[in-house]
Image (cartoon, helix red, strand yellow):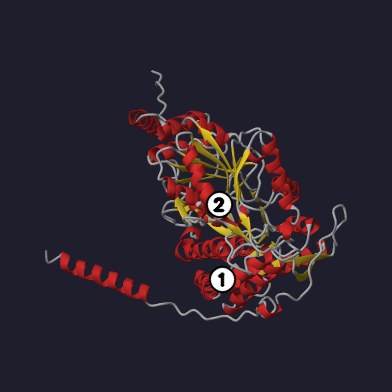
Amino acid sequence: MAFWWPLLVLAAAYALCRLLLFLIPPTVPAIEVDASDVLEDPKTREDGFIYIPPRKGKSIQADKVQCYEPATMKYLGYFPALTPDEVKEHVAQARKAQKVWAKSSFKQRRQFLRILLKYILEHQDLICEVSSRDTGKTMVDASLGEIMTTCEKITWLLDEGEKWLKPEYRSSGRSMLHKRAKVEFYPFGVIGAIVSWNYPFHNVFNPMLAAVFSGNAAVIKVSEHASWSGCFYHRIIQAALSAVGAPENLVHIITGFAETGQALVSSVDKIIFVGSPGVGRMIMERASETLIPVTLELGGKDSFIVCEDVDLPNVVQVAVRAALQSSGQNCAGAERFYVHKDIYASFVSLVVKIVKSICVGPPLSGKYDMGAICMIGHSEKLQNLVNDALEKGAEIAVRGSFGNLGEDAVDQFFPPTVLVNVNHTMKIMQEEAFGPILPIMKFDSDEEAIRLANDSKYGLGCAVFSGDQKRAIRIASQLHCGVAAINDFASSYMCQAYLCFSLQSLPFGGVKDSGFGRFAGVEGLRACCLVKAVVEDRFWPYIKTMIPKPIQYPISEHGFEFQQLLVETLYGVSVWDRLRSLVNLLKMISEKNAPPAPVTTKKRR
């Protein structure tokens, strides 16, 4: 017993020290970010210019990205649409800065993350308001989709990022027991990202965090529909980088249209794209010219399956949030609802009750549950999807109500709409809507639910609800998609980030027309790296690699026989096969190494 006491005391002391270190907060400097030009004075809200978009058929101004508030159409200003030569200059500056940053320590990179996290936590209202003004979402939607997701990513990188970028040792196999095998991760150089508009803060920070923490530079083209907020968020990144002594020009935000994006793809070492399948194909084509790796996240048509044995009131709340978060403008939003026939009527009734209570309006002008549609003309597309469904037999169960909409922005709002009696002949069940529409279809059996859910050209995510968790897991395992949530919706993204937001170690991405490759989590972090396989001597310099004599040049006449026995010794099916081959191999070697027998001659008498 006396032997164990010192060990127990040391272990307790170590645990106490770790606890104290955990409780002592790190020193994190505060940063100042100029926000004077993005803060709106409520007294002057009614003043200012109204943006009037070009008429249909009339081309937009090619050299300027015009910015406006979707919820009010108030003009926010413009940013330049960069030319290909200007894009190349941005990438060149980033490449020069990256060579310095690649040598930075993980301690310095973690401090950069802590500074960002501190600023985000202290300025949540500012970040959400900027996102709300630029995309029309409510403050709550902005907090869920912008703040929580980004904070979760930062904390995961702080806790685990370094571990997953350190060399990873692997098995060296039977023939190389004297070797040590490992995988090393080196920064690519300049990571390019072309991101969508629906979550401008998170969509900028998501690729930037992984790229910078893994030692890369980042050049990010923000959407022409969210350039105003993206350029402000860039100031936060610049201030944090400056605070840790990072080189200038490590992270760039660029603005423009298709030509700008094409130039970026042609200039960087890897491209991450978030957008539509059509543009994703063009990105791949351009990337093939320089043979750079590509990650594509191209949206989805996520299924939401509800079995008959669920806690219905709770599931209905999750379902409505899954469809209406940020006015339904989510890559991983629920767009197809499959409900068991035994609870179909009850499910619809509860959904109708909630949606009927939802009020839609300008999110910063009053207490509204849902905000605006970001893109001009998208409300018309949504109504066309509803009309197609109605013509084919669907019915509108309910629509939400509008609040006080300004006359200049009436077309930027769409009421939350519940459709029943839908089927797969309708466009609403096949095309990505990206809007606040809940089409609800009944199913009879688990097999039918699986067949319906897989009947889509998209394959991003799914959610399966059942009182029997094993049943839900069994259904989800048969769905062809990249992300699955059991008795929850989009929780894997917070395992990475969204609704029941939990971990953050999981990758995010899909299959089929939803794209390929992964960002976030271990896979996403390592996807920003050159993965190098390294083999070295385990016992250097005592044991070195030597070519066996029978297969040295010039090869002996018994070279193939030796090689044959060597293969059988290493990879024989059973232990006895391997031992038998080893004996034969050693016998062969000893015979070849034995001195030749002396030649005797008979003497003549």
Q: Is residue 16 left or right of residue 342?
A: left
Residue wearing tag 1? 104
Q: Quadrant of the N terminus?
A: bottom left
Whole-percent x, y for residue 305 in the image: 50, 40
Whole-percent x, y for residue 523 in the image: 53, 52
- Amino acid type assigned to the residue bearing label 1 in the image: Ser
Residue 6 falls in image quadrant: bottom left
Check the image and name the residue furthest to the top: 605
Can residue 548 be seen here? The reply is no
Residue wearing tag 2? 355
Does residue 401 sit above or below 205 in this rendering?
Answer: above
Nearer to me, 563 or 15: 15
Mark 1 closeness class: few <14, some 14–19, many ≥20 residues within 10 Å: some
Whole-percent x, y for residue 310 in the image: 41, 42
Check the image and name the residue furthest to the left: 1
Whole-percent x, y for residue 505 in the image: 48, 55
Q: Is residue 227 left or right of residue 506?
A: right
Which one is in front in this view, the residue at disc 1 or the one at disc 2?
Answer: 2
Nearer to me, 189 or 312: 312
- Amino acid type assigned to the residue bearing label 2 in the image: Val
Mark 2 closeness class: few <14, some 14–19, many ≥20 residues within 10 Å: many
Residue 19 falls in image quadrant: bottom left
Does residue 131 sit above or below 308 in this rendering?
Answer: below
Residue 539 falls in image quadrant: bottom left
Nearer to me, 574 or 229: 229
Residue 500 shows which numbered tag? Answer: none
